[in-house]
Amino acid sequence: MEKFDLFKSECGMVAEVVYKENKECTGSAAGVKFEKLEEHTEDAAREKHVPYIEEKENGYLVKVGKETAHPMLENHYITMIEIIVDGDKLYRKYLKAGDAPEAFFEVPKGETVKAREYCNLHGLWVSSK
């Protein structure tokens, strides 16, 4: 379990590790069991899930689906897009059905940039620049 790891509970709640002391942790909190979300990097489905990072003059644009945008329907949509810059600065935008599956982050440039998105049906997807 590391900083920024995402976990999903049996009831569908998604939680993030924001801080961890050097102690062994279990996959439960207050009696609720959590399972770590694995980061997917390749998309074999028709819908596009891998986030695509475009470096802009004053930040980064992240789109979900490079050629074809991910659906944003009531029952199938991207709940959030985030970037992690240089491993310690996290920026997140929450989305809802009907929104465009993209986010612009006006942030300082970094040496490393990792983009993640969470699809309510297909889980966590990641790419790096």
Image (spheres, helix red, strand yellow):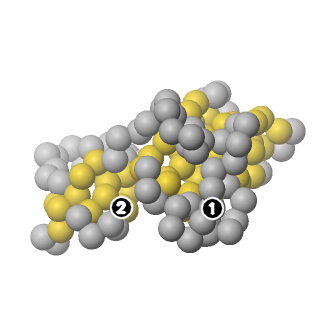
Determine whether, in the image, residue 31 is placed left or right of residue 110.
Answer: left
Determine whether, in the image, residue 48 is placed left or right of residue 57.
Answer: left
Residue 14 vertical position relative to residue 83 in the rendered view, above or below? below
What residue appears at the point 17 percent right and 54 percent down from the top-left corner?
27
Determine whether, in the image, residue 124 is placed left or right of residue 47.
Answer: left
| Residue identified by numbered label 2 | 15
Q: Which quarter of the rendering shows the C terminus?
A: top right
Q: Residue furthest front?
A: 46
Instruction: Give 72 or 33, whichever is nearer the viewer.
Output: 72
What residue appears at the point 83 percent right and 39 percent down from the top-left corner?
56
| Residue identified by numbered label 1 | 72
Q: Which quarter of the rendering shows the N terminus?
A: top left
Label 1 is placed on what type of residue? Answer: Met
Instruction: Give 126 or 87, whichever is nearer the viewer.
Output: 126
Question: Could you say where residue 13 lies in the image, as x and y percent from the top left?
Answer: 34, 67
Q: In terms of sequence position, does the residue under pointer 2 or pointer 1 come before the other?
A: 2
Q: Nearer the viewer, mark 2 or mark 1?
A: 1
Q: Residues within 10 Å of mark 2 (few under 14, many from 20)?
A: some
How far apart in space, not on screen, are marks 2 and 1 (Cα)?
Answer: 22 Å
Element class at badge 2: strand
What residue appears at the point 66 percent right and 42 percent down from the top-left corner?
65
Label 2 is placed on what type of residue? Answer: Ala
Quarter occupied by residue 77 = bottom right
Question: Could you say where residue 84 lies in the image, as x and y percent from the top left?
Answer: 56, 43
